[in-house]
Amino acid sequence: MEYSDIINNLKTDKEQPTSEEIIILDKVFVENKKNFSALFSEFKEVTLILILFILFSLTQTDNIIKKLIPKLESSNIYLTLVKGFLFIIIFWIIKNFYLIKK
């Protein structure tokens, strides 16, 4: 305990901060807030991509697409291309219309 300081013994400044100090503190904390919101925004995008990837990897999705477009029954390459285009379109729609609002 001899290495620690008691809070009451610490020297403090009883003066109110100046307007310049307040401006500096506001800038520092606003920058940190922007960093956290940017990180959270990127996390939402990654989560959306992960969910869409899992959904488009399911065999049930393949079966639904094959029922809607019977020509894809014979070619896995075309099925993969269609799923890729659907993935991009759905991601773009959700990103531009849902995530931007929040």
Image (cartoon, rainbow, N blue to C red):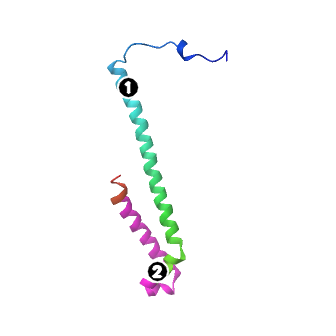
Looking at the rendered image, the quarter that the N terminus falls into is: top right
Which amino acid type is marked by label 2?
Answer: Ile
Q: Which mark is residue 67?
A: none
Depth order, front residue of 58/81: 58
Magenta extent: 67-95
Question: Tag 2's secondary structure?
Answer: helix
Q: Which residue is mark 1?
A: 24
Q: Eyeballing the image, is 8 above or below 53?
A: above
**Residue 12 in picture, x, y percent from top left:** 47, 14
Compare marks 2 and 1 and give the one earlier in the sequence.
1
Residue at mark 2 to residue at mark 1: CA–CA distance: 57 Å
User: What element does badge 1 sit on?
Assistant: helix
Mark 2, residue position: 64
Crowdedness of circle 1 by 10 Å Cα count: few (<14), some, many (20+)?
A: few
Q: Does 84 lie within the magenta span?
A: yes
Characterize the magenta stretch by its predominant secondary structure: helix
- Left or right of 102: which side holds 67? right
The residue shown at (51%, 84%) is 75
